[in-house]
Image (cartoon, helix red, strand yellow):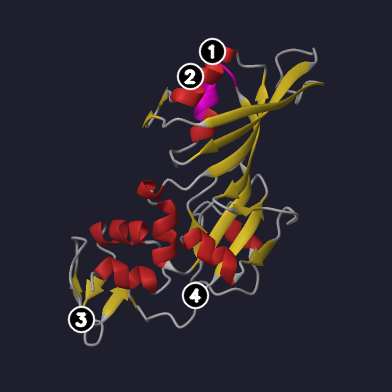
Amino acid sequence: MRLEKYIATSGIASRRAVKRAIREGHITVNGAKILIPGHPIDVEKDIIEFEGKQVQPLTEHIYLILNKPAGYLTTRRDERGRPTVMDLLTDLPKSIYPVGRLDLETEGLLLFTNDGNFANRLMHPSHEIEKTYLAWVNGIPSKRALERLRNGIAIPGGKTAPAKIKQLNVKTVPPSSANSKTHKNEVVAKFRVIIHEGKKRQVRLMFKAVGHRVIRLKRTRIGALGLGNLPQGQYRFLTPTEVAQLQA
C-alpha cells in the first residue's frame, strides 16, 4: 500500500494533507524519514510514525456535519490561540478533522471525518461535487455581471468553472456597521450560488471581480446533503444513507 493512503485511512489527516506532511519530513518508515509521496509499505511489517507517534489502523470511521458559525477558523489548531471549529466538537476522538474548509467569516455546512479516502473523494476536483451557498451581496449585480459569473470569471487562483447563480430577493437595510462609508440605507441582494470547485474564498472573489462585496456567506449543501434544521454551532453524525450518497 502507498504510504499516504495508509496514513489517510488511519484517520490522522486527508491524503492531500498527508502528502504535504511527507514532503515536509514529518513521516518515517522504520525510523527512516520519507520525503517523496507514493512510497510503498508493508502494512503487516513496517512501523510508520507521524510526527513521532506510531500510526495505528482505524477500527471505526466517523462522519459528522457541523453548522459552522462565523468567527471560527477551519483548522485543527491555531498557533495564535484563535477559536477553531474543533472547539465546537465535544466528546469526540481527536483523530477527526474537517473536510475542506470554510473561511473565518463564512457560515454553514462543514463535514468532519477520520476516513481519509472519504475526505479525498469529496475534495478531489475530478468528482465535481456541487456545493450550494447563500450569498448576501452589497448592491445588485447587472445581468451582464451575472452572466460573467455563470460562464466563469478570472480570480486569484485561476478562472472559475461555470456556476449556477440565481437571485432570490433584494432588501433595503440600514448601514451594516460603523465602518460603513455612508449613513444611507444599503441595498442587499441575496443569491443562491452553486459551484463544484474549492478555490480559496471563491464565491467572495467571484462577486468582487464584478464589483460587489459579499457581506454574508453561508454554505447550505454539499451534493445531496443539506443543513436542514441543524442549529448554528451544533453538529450531528451522518446516517449510513447520507454517507453512501456522498461516497457515490
Binning the other alpha carbons within 10 Å of mark 2 as few (below 14), some (14 to 19) or many (20 upward) gives some
- Give the Cα distance between marks 2 and 3: 51 Å
Residue 6 seen by the camera: yes
Q: Position of residue 152 (x, y in %)?
A: 43, 25
CB of mark 3 within 8 Å of CB of mark 4?
Answer: no
Q: Mark 2 belongs to which amino acid?
A: Arg
Horizontal side of 5 relative to 33 (left or right) equals right
Residue 138 on the magenta segment: no
- Give the Cα distance between marks 2 and 1: 6 Å
Q: Give the mark count.
A: 4
| Residue stretch in magenta | 205-212
Q: Which residue is mark 2?
A: 148
Q: Which residue is mark 3?
A: 42
Residue lying at 18% horizontally and 68% vertically, measured from the top left: 39
| Element class at badge 1 | helix
Foreground: 227 or 23? 227
Foreground: 41 or 131? 131
Q: Main secondary structure of the magenta part?
A: helix
* Quadrant including the N terminus: bottom left
Residue 209 seen by the camera: no
Q: Mark 1 belongs to which amino acid?
A: Arg
Q: Mark 3 belongs to which amino acid?
A: Asp
Residue lying at 48% horizontally and 19% vertically, measured from the top left: 148
| Element class at badge 2 | helix
CB of mark 2 within 8 Å of CB of mark 1?
Answer: yes
Q: Which residue is mark 4?
A: 61
Q: Which residue is mark 1?
A: 144
Q: Position of residue 104 (x, y in %)?
A: 58, 43
Which circle's residue, 4 or 1, is located before the other in the chain? 4
